[in-house]
Image: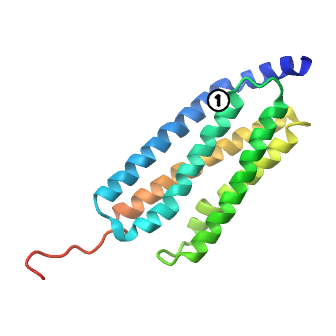
Amino acid sequence: MVLAEATRPLLAQWENFYVIVGSSAGALTGLQFVVIALIAEVEALSGMLEVRAFGTPTVVHFSAALLISAILSAPWPALSGAGLALGASGAAGVVYAMMFIRHVRRQTGYKPDAEDWVWYAVLPLVAYATLLGGAILLAWYRTWSLFVIAGTTLLLLFVGIHNAWDTVTYVAIGHGQRPKESKGQS
């Protein structure tokens, strides 16, 4: 029970951080749903497969930031439980990031440039691998690991913000628009 008592003050110091980050991630996830629904309603459908391919990971990254916030806001009796949950989340994120890379390499509708590879593939993979590493090291380096995990959570939030903006601007400047048929043509 001594460990449980030591865990509570350590995680309590992060409460405001994770309330802010978790709330932001939740709100931005909802906003991303609205944006995708509006895009579909405007009938920017020729690029819709690309929007889905690049929009879904954005929701996943926001959701991961929300999940990390929830995990570290839970009343864990010991950090080992939080470490296991964070480690599983990091491992799942690494697998997801690798699947995304494979998916993007196979799709033919959009050729990502170097910036896209950094924001959509490299940074998320680094974030999830860092989360996994931070979770593993949580048993030995509690304070340092919590800062690493917090930085990772912010990275996922910022990647999501960048990628959501990138999706919106991609559609807004017309890359996803079908040519409109003029009236009177068959």
Image side of residue 67 versus residue 91, left or right: left
Q: Quadrant of the C terminus?
A: bottom left
**Vertical placement of residue 84 versus 19, above or below:** below
Rendered view: 149 above or below 49: above
Horizontal and vertical percent for residue 19?
Answer: 60, 28
Frontmost residue, 151 versus 61 = 61
Q: How many marks?
A: 1
Q: How far across and down, in percent of the image, does residue 151 sit?
A: 70, 42
Q: Secondary structure at mark 1?
A: helix
Q: Quadrant of the N terminus?
A: top right
Q: Residues within 10 Å of mark 1 (few under 14, many from 20)?
A: some
**What amino acid is found at the position of numbered circle 1 in the picture?**
Phe
Q: For the point 33% across and 52% down, which residue is it?
A: 38
Which image quarter: residue 13? Answer: top right
Instruction: Pinpoint residue 26: horizontal percent, then vertical percent.
Output: 52, 38
Where residue 131 appears, x then y in whole percent?
Answer: 75, 46
Observer-nearest residue: 117 or 90?
90
Q: Residue furthest bottom?
A: 186
Question: Which residue sits at x=11%, y=81%?
Answer: 185
